[in-house]
Image (cartoon, rainbow, N blue to C red):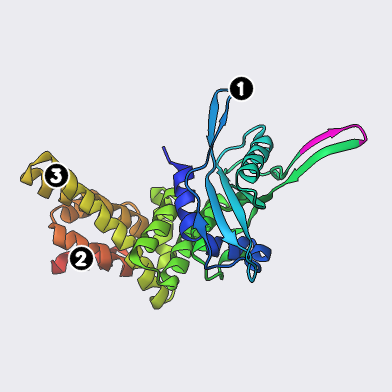
Amino acid sequence: MVDHDRLFKELLTTFFVEFVDLFFEDVSGYLDRNSISFLDKELFTDVTAGEQFEADIVAKVRFLDRDTYFLVHIENQSSCEAGFDFRMYRYFARLYEKFRLPVYPIVVYSFNEPLRAAPNIHRVEFPGFTVLEFHYRVLQLNRLNWRDYLRQENPVAGALMAKMRIAPGERPRVKLECLRLLATLRLDPARMKMISGFVDIYLKLSAEEERLFAMELATIGPGDREGVVEIVTSWMEEGIARGREEGIARGREEGLIQGKQEEALILVQRLLNRRLGQLDTEILERVRTLSVAELEALSEALLDFHELAALITWLDQK
């Protein structure tokens, strides 16, 4: 099961300023970027219902050029939930009561369905008299068009395009564009891995989609292509490394070597299938005889293959 809350919390705390810059430009204008601190886990207990709730992200920030602070509360909501507007109000009320600071509430709706606009208000009213009208900001990803964020030099755009409105046939293209944007940002390895992993989780491709992804990859410029290939290759290396670690845990050196080769072979076959289509048995048998080092070399070389003859030539040379 995907831990949506953890993934979004890691992304939005690591790139908090970039998130605000991208989606809440008005807040970005009065936020002191050097003052941000994240509060410890905020737990709220409903004694009457016997339930406990935890706020996803609460950041304490200072107003720009003022010696006063406010809180930014961000909730990720990965499913459509009745009564969520009341929960947002309850969080607001508890935070406001506890810290006596203004609270800026934001909801990131990351579910795929429904597509209708999610609520952004909680009311208590009587005929002719409104007691309470609580508003919160909403970022509903499935109502955003990924194309609008293609040219944003922002790591959060590179990650969240994977959760925006995407037609089924566009999935390989969107994954490629997410990785291309990520490659241009030149982040440190840890942050690069975080976002590329986020994209890979939310845009898992079928075998046919992977083949289309490879075809799209072959059409982009050499500079961009090199960066994307580096990310894809790192996924392969991590897969091989996982096989190695499992072999060590089992304490069987023979199993380690075999597991590493099988992992490399599976990954290379997936790349070949999406690049050249389904291969016949004879070709597959030749690929299976390759060593781990040769499989790794083939994983890089095959991105230049445009037809089956190129693969056969490469195998003949080996």
Give the Cα separation between the discs numbered 3 and 1: 51 Å
Residue hosting label 1:
48
Quick check: 311 left or right of 162?
A: left
Residue hosting label 3:
247
Position above or below: 102 against 115 = below
Which of 27 and 177 lies nearest the eye of the viewer? 27
Position above or below: 52 against 24 = above
In the picture, the disc for residue 76 is none
Residue type at mark 2: give it. Ala
Which of 16 and 318 lies nearest the eye of the viewer? 16
Please give the name of the residue rendered at 26% of the width and 52% of the height, measured from the top-left corner: 239
Give the Cα separation between the discs numbered 2 and 3: 22 Å
Residue hosting label 2:
297
Q: Position of residue 294 (x, y in %)?
A: 16, 62
Which of 154 and 293 lies nearest the eye of the viewer? 154
* Element at label 1: loop
Disc 1 crowd, CA 10 A, few/some/many (<14, 14-19, 20+): few
Q: Which residues are magenta?
A: 123-128
Which of 261 and 24 lies nearest the eye of the viewer? 24
Please give the name of the residue rendered at 38% of the width and 63% of the height, measured from the top-left corner: 192
Residue type at mark 1: give it. Thr
Quick check: 105 left or right of 42?
A: right
Q: Position of residue 180 (x, y in %)?
A: 45, 68
